[in-house]
Image: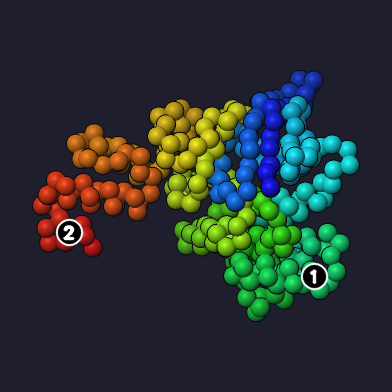
Amino acid sequence: MALLLNHVEHVYGKGTAFEKVALYDINLQINEGEFIGLIGHTGSGKSTLIQHLNGLLKPTDGGVYYNGEDINEKGFSKKKLRSKVGIVFQYPEQQLFETTVLEDVKFGPKNLGLDNLEMDMRSYEALKQVGIGEDLLDVSPFELSGGQKRRVAIAGVLAMQPEILILDEPTAGLDPQGKDDILNLIEKLHRERKITVIVVSHSMEDVAKYVERLIVVNHGKIAFDDTPKKVFAHYKELEEMGLAAPQITYIMHALKEKGLPVDPSDTTVEEAREDILHALKEMNSPLLKGGVLND
């Protein structure tokens, strides 16, 4: 499975006084099993980009290919594509509308024309995978907490059995615990189901901790496409784009400048802790005596 964007351009209102280029010459390949982060400032083109991945938007120029087929060619099944490339939009709980949790999750499989048994099996399995118990199946989705609604929305896409799962700001509006729960759930789904995951996020800490590949969009173009470590090494350029590196990156750079032999490319607290402890041991620092930093 591969999703390819070849010289994709998208212009809103082309030929009018309101013409605006949202994407310019995008060349991108999404490979099977990847965990990708997509970041960019507001208006950078992130949302426009992900809507091209399952045919919600058609390029003004260029092509989008799924398993070698042009998704915008006549005769290509967009319905089938959207079952394979699922998008969970920002604040997905606002899109819940059925009378019960189970019926809401069954909506997608029903549109695929599946029989009742297959719909039920897929829906039960998807709800189980996101941690929604049987006691909530007949409850109105509007009675759930914010985090539970987010899980139900994700289950609705999982029940379609996608090969690629795209989540637009999946932690927006959640409290810190709810945020961690959703991110851990997404990481678990990627690990256990082996599906490709693309997370659109404004949180540098989140993408640094979870994703393997990081794509930065700036003014409709791909500015960076690499591992988080290599991307965040360009933190000064990211700042010029209205972005930033994780806070830990700035701390490690400051420690390095003060003479501590640490790796400034560290992007997570866990990496930084190990690195700092190692550096202090090498220096035989008195801070380590008595276990001050070993707890």
> Which residue appears at 57% of the width and 48% of the height?
34
- Judging by the rendered image, the residue that carries numbered circle 1 is 118
Question: Looking at the rendered structure, which numbered label has been put on residue 61?
Answer: none
Residue type, numbered disc 1: Glu
Q: Label 1's element?
A: helix
- Residue farthest to the right, as pictured: 75
255 w.r.t. 23: above or below: below
Q: Mark 2 points at which residue?
A: 292
Q: Distance between the residues labelled 1 and 2?
A: 57 Å
Residue 160: x %, y % from top left: 74, 59
Q: Which of 131 and 160 is in front in this view?
A: 160
The quadrant holding residue 36 is: top right
Asked if the residue at tag 2 contacts the one at tag 1, i.e. Cβ–Cβ closer than 8 Å, the answer is no
Residue 293, image x and y in percent? 20, 57
Residue name at image x 11 percent, y 58 percent: 289
Q: Is residue 162 left or right of residue 264?
A: right
Q: Is residue 122 visible?
A: yes
